[in-house]
Amino acid sequence: MSSLSGFKSIPLRPVQLSLAASLKCGQSFRWSILTNPLPEAETNLDQCQPADSSRVEYRLCLKDRVVCLRQSSDSLYYRNVFPNPQPVPAELPGREAETLAWLKDYFQLDVDLGFLYKQWSSQDKVFAKFQDRFEGIRMLRQDPWENLVSFICSSNNNISRITKMVQNLCTHYSPTLLSEEHPFSPSESIAYHPFPSPSALADPEAALHLRSLGFGYRANFIQRTANMLVSAHGISASNTPYGTVEASELWLKELRQRLTAEAREELLKFVGVGRKVADCILLMSLDKVSALSSEIVLHIGLPLNPAIEDRSRSSRHPRVPNCRQTLWFEISELGESYYVPKTVRGNQHKVF
């Protein structure tokens, strides 16, 4: 393990956040999940780390750092790995505070998931019966640009192929930020790439190259969408606590401040983005819970409760309010979102 930065921890039980459930269910496709191949009895356990945290590590490359996570029965452990030149010691507390703020935002840790589950279970017998299947799943608050491209890749696709596509985008269109040793195999070094910027994918030649990498018709969608963003907003860069971002990336984030209908209208302008994809982007990266469709809700609810009837199919894309009270009694504005990842988790093949 690198000594660049030791693990910090916050008290957090898996009932509030399960990394395994939240990061392996098809929400985000860039997390590296690194496991210890040795049996538990053969691992050299650090007494300061619970046994669970000694077997699995999750890593994500941001624009300026790699975030490493582990989890125990009562804590979430995190550390940073920075590229050279390394932050000076006086800077490390501030950088660690940035990562903690990012974690709280990304996993929406201000939401008391355990409290919500208790409420849902008390008012919905079906949920009470199946709640263990949903334990610790959180809706990730993702970067809108990455989320947009990931959903374009998801068209008529499955999780393994989407993951490969997203990883190819990073490998071929984003320079290596750093290389870090495997936590359980020190002789193995892993290269980490941030998600590419819109300008990196805007060149027409990118479409041809992406086709050669197996993107099919999605290659053209990605390149043209990137070009639309760059043409409209330029490539000027701004510094943020987590690295440099382009103007078009900031513009996409600003859609969080727009009304849902306005943000949806902007998303529908992009090539390869239809109503369903637009609403998923609104939900998963632009804070628009109202965009969740009853089509998705019923797709999730029907296997658990066959008595629920799809009364809204006459509409091209029915909205959630028609069935929200039937399913969850409007317990929480955020309530529905925690069902979405489980649907994908229960069906590892078809995404759309």
Image: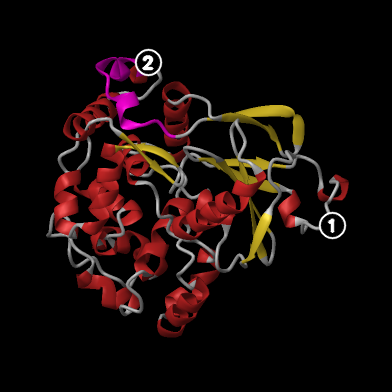
Q: From the viewer's perspective, is residue 61 above or below residue 317?
A: above
Q: Quadrant of the N terminus?
A: top right
Q: Nearer the viewer, residue 199 or 87?
A: 87
Most extreme residue toward the bottom is: 122
Q: Residue 212 got which mark?
A: 2
Residue at the spot x=70%, y=35% of the render?
182
Considering the whole magenta stretch, tell me its main secondary structure: helix
Amino acid identity at mark 2: Ser
Kind of element beneath mark 2: helix
Q: From the viewer's perspective, is residue 138 above or below residue 254?
A: below
Mark 2, other Cα within 10 Å: few <14 / some 14–19 / many ≥20? few
Amino acid identity at mark 1: Gln
Total of numbered circles in the picture?
2
Q: Which residue is mark 1?
A: 47
Residue 5 left/right relative to 107: right
Q: Residue 337's quadrant in the figure?
A: bottom left
Mark 1, other Cα within 10 Å: few <14 / some 14–19 / many ≥20? few
| Residue 109 point in image, percent of width and height | 49, 65
- Numbered range of the magenta stretch: 195-209
Q: Nearer the viewer, residue 127 or 179?
A: 179
Residue at the spot x=49%, y=80% of the render?
118
Q: From the viewer's perspective, is residue 118 above or below residue 254?
A: below
Are dots 2 and 1 in contact, CB under 8 Å?
no
Q: Report if residue 197 lies within the magenta region.
A: yes
| Residue 82 point in image, percent of width and height | 59, 38
Alpha carbon of mark 2 to alpha carbon of mark 1: how far?
Answer: 49 Å
Most extreme residue toward the front is: 90
